[in-house]
Image (tube, rainbow, N blue to C red):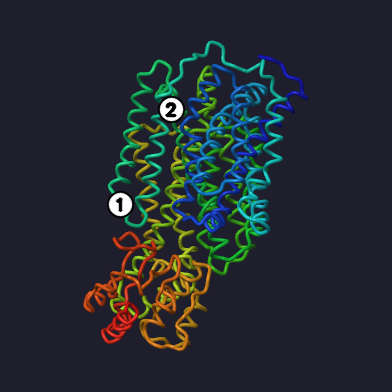
């Protein structure tokens, strides 16, 4: 093993730490930038989410192949090539003109990370030696956590002052410095290759793995939302993901030079358990990296700058704890430390259940501090377990597995939580749209009215409820991390499936408890409910239009000087003149449906409404059911519609 001077070690570690920092900054910048991207690029949440998911797929699929290439060609060379590709693609994202180009650049950026991320672990271990492996991993984890500290703070400030492009442009100096350090600190002529490593690469295996990830993630992200479960193409892509995964596993069993030596798992139960725990921990991260920023910004109406500071507290605790946990793992039982980390982080998740729409910033520090401490306790000991239970000659492959498991776990968690977020909103919007208010009790109708008058499916009450649902689900996911970290616990494949079923059952029971313990599933602010009662509305009141206007970001005109059901219930979407508002309502004056429908057909249509995925819906937004208006008012509304259409 080559001996490195203290100065050379410092320079190499600076390059590795900066690259790790760049990767974690990316993950912490994006969640806060999604709303601004949607507005600026005239996109939707379901499309923008692939700016993150596409990056994760591109980073995860080729990562094992990149690790094998690093063994053969040298970890130094792959690190240098990967950082250059990653940095240049990140700079180009600043100038992306639309969403498809941005997603394409993110795919290239993800490929760059697939090349360099596995090498950081291998290079750090090489220059520190096995006796100080925990310390090296602790430093890398601290750099990763530092990105999650700096990311929200800088992203919040940049979004308040500029826009989403600034979150990429601001990192251009870091990108240039990363390239310079990667080329100068590491000698291309000393590539740190593994002696005797094969140069036969399993390219089909990498393609199968990438296809599997895309198909399964696409299905997890799309099927729970709207009416996508009725789309055969979505099911076909989802099923193809499992087919590709089967092909990947078969390929790895028969290939002479597989991407993954399945013997790593069959020969070491401890290694298998550490991998499952690692993936489960990352699968739970979207609670704090995706849901929490949205709730704080859109629900509790905090500034992005303030949210950045709040979220940075958790990452700061992780940064402080990680090096200590890494050193402790070298001296004590790493499994106990990882188990404690899973328990502590889970306790932090459960503390988020006490967040309400009136919670202030001070009330968020305790759960985030607990979450940060738990994260710092878990990762370094867990990574040390992975390396300690793998043969030294497979160090490169295991380093590739680090990145693959990390990205795959986070991607699956992100797809699951994002679809859960949208599905919860769809559930309530379906009740609003399809349920005639005459079929609801006055209390239930008033509660839904309060929710939608306060912002609809983006109301504070709704978002806080979604935060609680996500907290329950992510805590259940952490059960897998805990079970697989407990010392001396023997877990067979059958027991592993049982643990997975128990985790899923805990999630379902937890969400059911939320629905049962909280009437209607969502707590309505008492001040809102009081204002409704003080206004003495009829037993069933109209609602929804203010919420939709808030989402549209503009105030719609109403029919000036006119009265009647159209001015009261339709003009907010279709305009005072009936010619429609962009993204809200169609032009009724020129509507062939309105012109060709009989009064009975129009009345039946108004009674039941129409969902976004139904044939004929051109706005992509729901048309609420108006059965609650009553026969007389519906007949008057039909007469007005006939007048509008000539």
Judging depth in this view, the residue of 387 and 340 nearest the camera is 387
Q: Earlier in the sequence, mark 1 or mark 2?
A: 2
- Splitting the image into 4 quarters, where does residue 597 fall? bottom left
Q: Where is residue 56 in the image (x, y as percent from the top left)?
A: 49, 40
In the picture, the disc for residue 206 is 2
Q: Is residue 486 visible?
A: no
Measured Cα–Cα span from mark 1 to mark 2: 29 Å
Place of residue 588 in the rendered image (x, y in percent of width and height, measured from the top left): 35, 73
Against 563, residue 374 (above or below) is above
Q: In this view, does 589 lie above or below 170?
A: below
Furthest toward the right, the residue is 7
Q: In this view, does 633 lie to the left or right of 34?
A: left
Q: Is mark 2 on a helix, strand or loop?
A: helix
Q: Can residue 464 be seen in this view?
A: yes
Q: Nearer the viewer, residue 506 or 153?
A: 153
Image quarter in which the C terminus is found: bottom left
Which residue, given by chain and number where applicable, does mark 1 sit on?
Answer: 229
Label disc, if present, on residue 635 of the rendered structure: none
Residue name at image x 28 percent, y 52 percent? 230
- Mark 1 residue element: helix
Instruction: Quadrant for the N terminus, please.
Output: top right
> Badge 1 local density, few (<14 within 10 Å), some, or many (20+)?
some
Crowdedness near tag 2: few (<14), some (14–19) or many (≥20) residues, C-alpha within 10 Å? many
Residue 598 percent location from the top left of the image:
22, 76
Q: Do the residues labelled 1 and 2 touch (CB within 8 Å)?
A: no
In-front residue for pair 175/496: 175
Q: Which residue is rendered at x = 63% and y = 55% of the image?
A: 163
Residue found at the very far top of the displayed protein: 196
């Amino acid at each position: 093993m080559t001996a490195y001077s203290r100065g050379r070690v410092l320079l190499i570690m600076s390059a590795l730490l900066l690259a790790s920092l760049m990767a974690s900054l990316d993950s912490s910048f994006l969640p806060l930038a999604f709303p601004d991207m949607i507005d600026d690029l005239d996109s939707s949440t379901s499309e923008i989410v692939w700016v993150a998911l596409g990056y994760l797929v591109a980073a995860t699929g080729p990562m094992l192949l990149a690790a094998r290439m690093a063994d053969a060609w040298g970890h130094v060379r792959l690190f240098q090539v990967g950082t250059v590709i990653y940095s240049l693609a990140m700079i180009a994202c600043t100038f992306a003109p639309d969403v498809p180009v941005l997603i394409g650049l993110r795919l290239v950026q993800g490929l760059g990370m697939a090349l360099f991320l596995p090498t950081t672990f291998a290079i750090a271990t090489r220059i520190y030696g096995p006796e100080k492996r925990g310390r090296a991993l602790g430093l890398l984890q601290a750099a990763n956590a530092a990105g999650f500290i700096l990311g929200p703070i800088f992203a919040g400030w940049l979004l308040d002052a500029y826009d989403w492009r600034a979150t990429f442009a601001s990192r251009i100096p870091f990108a240039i410095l990363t390239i310079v350090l990667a080329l100068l600190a590491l000698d291309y002529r000393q590539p740190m290759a593994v002696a005797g490593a094969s140069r036969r690469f399993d390219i089909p295996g990498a393609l199968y793995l990438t296809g599997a990830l895309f198909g399964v993630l696409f299905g997890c992200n799309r099927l729970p939302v709207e009416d996508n479960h009725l789309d055969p193409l979505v099911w076909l892509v989802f099923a193809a993901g499992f087919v590709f995964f089967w092909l990947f596993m078969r390929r790895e069993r028969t290939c002479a030079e597989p991407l993954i030596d399945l013997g790593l798992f069959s020969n070491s139960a401890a290694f298998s358990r550490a991998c499952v725990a690692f993936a489960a921990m990352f699968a739970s991260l979207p609670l704090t990296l995706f849901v929490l920023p949205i709730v704080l910004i859109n629900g509790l109406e905090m500034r992005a700058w303030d949210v950045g500071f709040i979220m940075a507290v958790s990452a700061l605790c992780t940064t402080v704890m990680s090096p200590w946990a890494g050193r402790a793992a070298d001296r004590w039982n790493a499994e106990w430390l990882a188990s404690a980390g899973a328990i502590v982080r889970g306790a932090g998740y459960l503390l988020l259940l006490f967040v309400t729409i009136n919670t202030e910033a001070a009330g968020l520090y305790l759960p985030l501090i607990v979450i940060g401490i738990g994260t710092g306790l878990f990762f370094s000991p867990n990574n040390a377990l992975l390396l300690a239970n793998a043969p030294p000659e497979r160090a490169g492959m295991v380093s590739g597995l680090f990145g693959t498991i990390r990205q795959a776990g986070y991607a699956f968690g992100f797809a699951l939580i994002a679809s859960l977020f949208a599905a919860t909103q769809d559930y309530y919007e379906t009740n609003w749209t399809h349920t005639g208010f005459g079929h609801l009790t006055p209390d239930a109708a008033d509660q839904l009215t309060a929710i939608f008058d306060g912002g609809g499916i983006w109301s504070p009450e709704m978002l806080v409820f979604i935060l609680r649902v996500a907290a329950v689900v992510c805590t259940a996911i952490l059960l897998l991390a805990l079970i697989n970290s407990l010392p001396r616990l023997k877990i067979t494949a059958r027991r592993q499936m049982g643990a997975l079923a128990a985790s899923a059952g805990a999630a379902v029971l937890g969400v059911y408890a939320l629905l049962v313990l909280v009437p209607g599933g969502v707590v309505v602010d008492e001040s809102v409910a009081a204002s409704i009662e003080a206004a003495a509305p009829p037993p069933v009141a109209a609602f929804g239009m203010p919420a939709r206007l808030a989402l549209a970001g503009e105030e719609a005109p109403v029919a000036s000087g006119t009265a009647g059901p159209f001015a009261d219930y339709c003009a907010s979407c279709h305009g005072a003149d009936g010619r429609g508002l962009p993204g809200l309502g169609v032009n009724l004056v020129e509507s062939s449906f309105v012109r060709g429908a009989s009064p009975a057909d129009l009345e039946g249509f108004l009674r039941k409404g129409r969902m976004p995925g139904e044939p004929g819906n051109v706005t992509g937004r729901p048309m609420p059911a108006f059965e609650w208006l009553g026969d007389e008012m519906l007949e008057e509304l039909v007469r007005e519609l006939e007048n509008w259409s000539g």
